[in-house]
Amino acid sequence: MAILVTGGAGYIGSHMVLNLADAGETVVVLDNLVTGFDWAIDSRAIFVRGDAGDIALVARLIEEYEISEIVHFAGSIVVPESVVDPLKYYANNTATSRNLIDAAVRAGIRHFIFSSTAAVYGMTGLEPVVETSPLNPMSPYGRSKLMTEWMLADVAAAHPMTFGVLRYFNVAGGDPGMRTGQSTPHASHLIKVACQTALGQRDHIDIYGTDFDTPDGTGVRDYIHVTDLIAAHALLLKHLRAGMESSTINCAYGQGYSVRQVIEAVREISGVPFRVNEAPRREGDPASVTATGQKARMLLGWVPRLNDLYTIVDTAFAWERHLMLRNR
Ligand SMILES: NC(=O)c1ccc[n+]([C@@H]2O[C@H](COP(=O)([O-])OP(=O)(O)OC[C@H]3O[C@@H](n4cnc5c(N)ncnc54)[C@H](O)[C@@H]3O)[C@@H](O)[C@H]2O)c1
Ligand SMILES: O=c1ccn([C@@H]2O[C@H](COP(=O)(O)OP(=O)(O)O[C@H]3O[C@H](CO)[C@@H](O)[C@H](O)[C@H]3O)[C@@H](O)[C@H]2O)c(=O)[nH]1
């Protein structure tokens, strides 16, 4: 029996592969390397380069490797890009997921775990959100993910498959053992961009919007360490295997930080007072996105261990420096 990890060459997926391999699971990674790296895949995993929406390929892999579960990370992830190129998101997130789920159902896959996002909530005005909060995604990215959530619910009602939807809040940091991290050179994520700026790879960082209705006027997010996020996946898998019913769960700490607070943490940890410019808001960006994370704790028994902004920034900065030295 094996587990299929789509997007296992990417930032979060490569951490999942490490977790599963460390636990002695047989892992098959399916990734087309559009944003991932083959070197990021742990050597204990089997790597197949291909598209997660290729039904025939997925069917072949399920049969060949006796796959019983799928953890689906593959997708396109940049909120502002989804605003200018929505069809890319409906294709690579919604349609790709549809095909993958199709192949899964036909082959009798028992459990399916899906990477969803805080972006499905949009601006609720009621924070921190819980899983039953209203869903008003503000971007095509959020809508493309919500459609996949709906598909999974419909499919699980009609077929003998259970699913776990994990709605990630802002994922950051890297493996404390420095085996993998966020490696996309042109990533748009705040902590990554700030670390690159501290290392002199960018001239400055822009703060997108200083007039939000937040304590210091800049966007607030609930940053979660990737290792804690992956621990939630491992627990979810364990519970699904033990017969837990399908569930949708937020992955967040319940603590928001503003853009200015994050930038200050990166300046402090790097010791570099890099340049910061104030810029207009980015389209599709909500002011504040935080969640309680209570359901993950109660239902999965999840205990966050790296829930501290400085730990997140420290591991992100260490990985960024590692990448810089590696690429020299
Ligand atoms: N990074 C975050 O803060 C965050 C937050 C919420 C949700 N998510 C979700 O988590 C998942 C992983 O995100 P990430 O940050 O690791 O991104 P990433 O870009 O590093 O990883 C995505 C991986 O999927 C692969 N991929 C993309 N489309 C594919 C396809 N059609 N077939 C096969 N492989 C494909 C890429 O090559 C890459 O390796 C995504 O679904 C994303 O929406 C991420
Ligand atoms: O150079 C930058 C980059 C970001 N920001 C701000 O920082 C905050 C966080 O932005 P970013 O790191 O780009 O994350 P989000 O746009 O919140 O989206 C991330 O977090 C979502 C979950 O909340 C995921 O679904 C997305 O895939 C992921 O990109 C926002 O207020 C941005 O406006 C800046 O001010 N300057």
Image (cartoon, grey):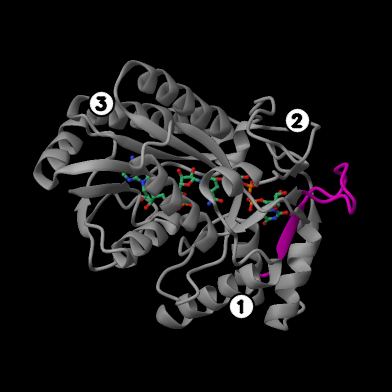
What is the magenta range?
A: 202-219
Residue occupying image coordinates x 60% and y 32% = 120
Q: Is residue 213 magenta?
A: yes
The residue tagged 2 is: 124
| Dot in front, 2 or 1 | 2
Which residue is more in the foreground, 267 or 86? 267
Q: Quadrant of residue 288?
A: top right
Q: The C terminus is located in which quarter?
A: bottom left
Amino acid type, callout 1: Leu
Is residue 202 at least partly visible in the picture?
no
- At mark 2, the secondary structure is loop
With 168 as the anchor, is 13 left or right in this view?
Answer: left
Cα separation between marks 2 and 1: 36 Å
Q: Which residue is mark 1?
A: 199
Marks 3 and 2, how far apart in space? 34 Å
Residue 194 vs residue 316, the one in the foreground:
316
**Amino acid at pointer 3:** Val
Q: Residues within 10 Å of mark 2 (few under 14, many from 20)?
A: some
User: Residue drawn 39% across and 29% down?
Assistant: 91
Q: Which mark is residue 105?
A: 3
Left or right placement of residue 61 versus residue 317 in this view: left
Residue type, label 2? Thr
Percent coordinates x, y for residue 87 in the rendering = 46, 27
Left or right: where does residue 133 sit relative to residue 231? Answer: right
Could you tell which of marks 2 and 1 lies nearer the N-terminus?
2
